[in-house]
Image (cartoon, grey):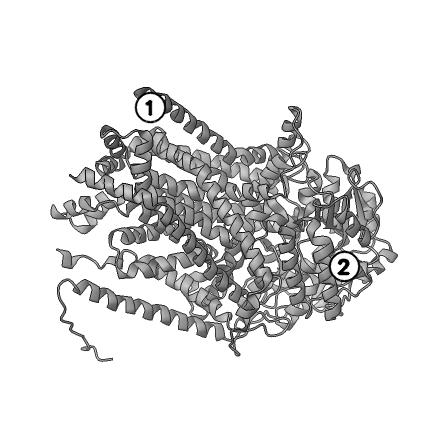
Amino acid sequence: MSATATRIRRPLLDRLLPVWAVLVFAFLFAPIVVIVIYSFNTGRLLAAFDSFGIESFLALFQKPVLMDAVMVSLRTGAIAAVLATLLGTLAGIALARRSGRWTAWFVGLLVLVSVTPEIVDAISLLPWLVFLGQDLGLSIFNDGTVRLVVGHSLFSVAVVSYIVRARLVGLPANLEEASADLYAPPLRTFRTITLPLAMPAVLAGLLLSFTFSLDNTIVSSFVQVSGATPWPVYVLSALRGGLRPEIASVSTIMLVLTLIALAVVALVLRRAGDSSTEIARTIAGG
Amino acid sequence: MNANNDVRILASRASAPLVRRELSRRGFLAVAAGAGTTMLLAACTTPGGSPAPAATGGTLENALSIYTWGDYDAPEVLEAFTSEKGPRITLDSYGSNEEMIAKLVAAKGTSGYDIIVPTGVFIPQLIENGLLYKLNRDLIPNIQHVDDAYLGRVWDPNNDYSICKAWGTTGFVYDKTVITRELKTWDDFFDAAKNEASGRTSVLDDPVEITGIYYWANGIDWDTTDPAEIDAAEKFLLEELAPHIAAFDSYPGGAAIPQATHALMQSWNGDARLGIMNSPEPERWQWVLGSPATELWMDNWAISASAPHPEAAHAFLNFVLDPEYAVAQIDYIGYHTGAKGIEQMAEEAGLGMLDMVFFTPEQLATMQDGEINEAQERNVEIWNKLKAAAGA
Amino acid sequence: MRNRRLPGFALALPAWAWLAVFFIAPVGVVFWYSFGYKPGLFGTHANDRLSFDRYLEVLTPTFFDTFVATMWIALAGTALCLVIGGPVAYWMAVKAPPSWRGLLLALVLVPFWTNFLVRTIGWQVILAPEGWASQAAQAIGLPAFDILYTRAAVLLGVVYNYLPLMILPLYVAFDRVGEPLREASRDLGANRLRTFWRVTLPLARPGIIVGVLLVYIPLMGDYITATVLGGAKGNMVGQMVAAQFQTAQNWALGSAMAVTLIIVIVLSASVVGALLWLVSWPLRRAHRVMLTEASR
């Protein structure tokens, strides 16, 4: 293998990869660009562009149902994401670090959760939640947000578990053993070694769970209660009358808000510094 | 159980964790089994929840919950109700009748919805399951403003439970630049689907709408349960129509018509009207009312049997049937609301393409009411086969 | 010290409990429905007479045909997601500046915080016969785009909506390999390709498997994503299940179909997984060689 051949190959691959990444990101954002532009549509139908104007943004204030739906979705998404990430991270760590006879059963359960069609989840969850809330008197299950969070968290728990497990499995446990040998209590080991090791997976799981929750339609439409219609359910049912541009306006506003939130989080993280992740990564790579 | 029932196990150090795991796993299975049993019991419980008190025209409650299709009422009408009568309106949405019924049945009287908007063919089901409130007609005098032709339908002959909200019919739209000849009947629809519009045809995503095309074209009763006729419909649709279908789309007006993605689309009248009016080239499209026969579907106002606010619900129904709001409603949703004299009001208000909303008595005579009957299972089977064949 | 440690599954206990209460219990009931029947026109399910009849009703030629079509779409979709998303995940985890990585991860998901139907309309505007793509193509002399409602459009819709489910696990997979390990490999004389093939890929394998399964398994049960851009060509078997639960209001048959579908999906995933395991055997043998050398 001549040195020249290696040198020629190096820049090409290094140059191609970012180009591909940019193309894929463009692919991902292409319809979003369309939607942002069409949120300035003054026509009656979202899909038929008439002329530029901001009327559809103003329509938001005439229809409280739109913002209510968005708030329900955002609230539910945040709670469901945190909950699913919590449960899934613990489960993933257990699967990777403490596997035993129970692992097969648990993975089987997770597979079952991922494989079950959403309509089955929806049809089964509704009477069950009514049973818990009414017949057993656990009135917390009559609350709209609680029901939605329950419905959204099922698949997400499985996803986070898989990803966290994949992150940790096979990585030697010598760091944790070293920590234990140094008399660190298990909780400390968990907090300072295991969790930072798993952090990219936890973050990815959190983001994915939030995304799933925002788009969850079928389970949401079945378990929702009066006054807590989530955004995707509203959009689906508005199809019948022809989607109006204000739906795009709402989407644009949500997009801008989430981008601002991301920027804020990025700034905060940069200030605080993710030193623990860096240390862990350096050690783990060695 | 005796508290001193500890079991002592002597095991080697290596196998102790295994033993512990086994016991705990059994504990888990027991919990899961227990949960499962409770669930079985739950599934067998009888319906609960108390029915709503009778509405007598007393003071209105301060809230009203409407469970309806998304965006199906003019916002100004809802605002006017709150500002004039008081109750604050909460709107919730569903995407299909079956979903709404499943929710009401499962909630066993605790759903919290006052007003629901079922499509006519589902009303017998709702009545039989005891989910509808028997209307106090004295509280809804504005029912006199509803055209008699739209009252007393077959699913609720005395309007004890429901009142017309909006009705529509089925036909098709075609692109005149692709199909240059004139199409007039369902047979023409089949013919165009096989020829000019092959691979560019869409049908409604509903089993009875698709089998309906065959029955209406051949003069067979849409609600037939005769196995021979159903088999004939299946054979014809699978062989003659399925290979040419590009999409099963119930709302072509929302995107397919303005974007001209298909050349021939079965559609409901209001949806098609919306699409054509908002298309960049409206003259390109021609709407045809299905002939020689077609359907009349109707969405109805109804009150849930367990409505928490029956007074407000009746007041709302009376309010919304006032002719003052009829034009606002028809302008917003694009369908005939069943109000008397609304055609004139709409014309005066300058709404466009009214031939797609109002029909002559002769046309009305060709529109059939549907029903959900024993043929439904076969219809769904045919629908699945059509989808498999069209996807091949 | 070891005796005071919590049993292995203790950390998984919360998830176990959550899923037991909110998944096993209710879905178990639906499974129970599959042994019942539809009691008359307006009922959805009844279980006073138990039988396997519903399962026999499920196994129709239509079910098989639709299932085969579903498998093609799922396999093609998963493969495309892997091929398209893999390099992106690799770039993000390995090549991109470290301070950007969290942001890039979030950016991958930002488009999916817009509602599914709204994103679909966005694509329809671009891909319609007279949409943006068509107009752009015609401007440079190419024929008009007629991609909507074809098999290609099916895959486009599927890949678009499932790409994050592939990119994120793959990112986590490649990220765990770590720069020092790759540097060490190159210090030992391996070139970039060899490093990738013998070090990066084997270590990233668990995450790659997760990505593939996270796309394939839900996609097999999905029926909406494939139809939004592909129309009739995107018919999938999940639609038959939903049709029984919704339009036909026959929960007994729907449950039987769902159970059958679940079993078949798991079987097919196992077959696909076994094939992948076989294919990656040479990789694993190489991996073992690597570790032996390193530990000396």
Q: How many marks?
A: 2
A164 sits to left or right of B171: left
Circle 2 sits in a helix, a strand or a loop, which is it?
A: helix
Residue beneath disc 2:
B214
Q: Nearer the viewer, residue B216 or C192?
A: C192
Q: Is residue A235 visible?
A: no
Image location (x, y in percent) of residue A269 = 33, 34
Q: Is residue B62 above or below residue B125?
A: above
Q: Is residue B372 above or below residue A64?
A: below
The residue sitting at 65% across, 47% down in the picture is B75
Q: Is residue A213 above or below residue B222?
A: above
**In the rendered structure, which amino acid carries the disc numbered 2?**
Tyr
Q: Quadrant of the N terminus of chain B?
A: bottom left
Pointer 2 and pointer 1 on the same chain: no
Which residue is at the far right? B362
Q: Nearer the viewer, residue A274 or C276?
A: C276
Q: Nearer the viewer, residue B376 or B166?
A: B376
Residue beneath disc 1:
A6
